[in-house]
């Protein structure tokens, strides 16, 4: 069955499974728990926090899709305050399944398309950017996405910088996969935002 033949619901489920595994738990040496407002989260790699205000975990937890554990993800905001789109933040994802960088990038584009963000003219560039900054992941690997004060997006794999995409439109579209009201995982979004247990 081709991607075009799959229903929108099936495509979204596949996207969620792929994306759940792309941003996850990383270096054990950095996996010291941090707590904010009752949220306990693995520490973010120090390199990912350089140049940012003090960040604390806002919300997050385990994402399951059709009973499968995909990843643990946590949103870190300035002092653990409510998420604001224009402010710097970190989305820290520990993957619990194997995913290639190519699959993660393709699924990200699928989700952006479903949300109506970006455009067909931009997607090829954004796809190439993501394949450049993403890494293949296996269970226990961590991808950390950083929305910087300059509205660029930096990506770290197990605490090591992979690259940066200096495009505010991409930054918004990418993190909207999880944080927009149009996300395919609405219940998990509420957990990331700290508005649901």
Image (tube, rainbow, N blue to C red):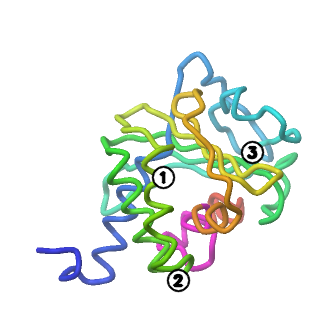
Q: Is residue 154 left or right of residue 69?
A: right
- Residue 38, given in percent of the width and then of the height, sits at 75, 45
Considering the numbered disc 2 on the image, is that residue within a helix, a strand or a loop? loop
- Would you identify the image quadrant in which residue 4 lies? bottom left
Specify the label residue 116 is tagged with.
Answer: 2
Considering the numbered disc 3 on the image, is that residue within a helix, a strand or a loop? loop
Specify the label residue 130 is tagged with.
Answer: 1
- Compared to residue 7, the image places residue 38 above or below, namely above
Q: Dot 2, crowdedness within 10 Å: few (<14), some or many (≥20)?
A: few
Residue occupied by mark 3: 38
- Front: mark 3 or 2: 2
Front one among 127 and 117: 127
**Residue at x 76% of width, y 57% of height:** 151
> Magenta part of the protein: which range?
175-189
- Compared to residue 131, the image places residue 8 above or below, namely below
- Would you identify the image quadrant in which residue 47 lies? top right
- Residue 7, given in percent of the width and then of the height, sits at 25, 83
Q: Is residue 109 left or right of residue 81?
A: left
Considering the numbered disc 1 on the image, is that residue within a helix, a strand or a loop? helix
């Amino acid at each position: 069955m081709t991607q075009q033949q799959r229903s929108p619901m099936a495509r979204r489920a596949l996207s969620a499974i792929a994306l759940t595994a792309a941003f996850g738990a990383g270096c054990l040496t950095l996996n010291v728990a941090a707590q904010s407002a009752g949220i306990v989260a693995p520490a973010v790699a120090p390199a990912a926090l350089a140049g940012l205000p003090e960040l604390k975990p806002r919300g997050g937890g385990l994402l399951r899709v059709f009973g499968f554990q995909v990843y643990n993800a946590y949103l870190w905001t300035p002092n653990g305050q409510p998420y604001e789109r224009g402010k710097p933040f970190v989305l820290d994802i520990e993957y619990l399944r194997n995913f290639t960088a190519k699959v993660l990038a393709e699924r990200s584009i699928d989700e952006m398309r479903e949300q109506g963000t970006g455009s067909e003219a931009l997607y090829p560039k954004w796809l190439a950017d993501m394949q450049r900054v993403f890494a293949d992941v296996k269970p226990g690997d961590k991808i950390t996405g950083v929305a910087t004060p300059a509205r660029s997006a930096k990506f770290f794999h197990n605490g090591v910088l992979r690259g940066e995409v200096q495009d505010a439109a991409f930054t918004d579209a990418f993190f909207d996969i999880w944080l927009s009201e149009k996300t395919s995982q609405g219940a998990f979004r509420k957990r990331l935002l700290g508005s649901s247990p």
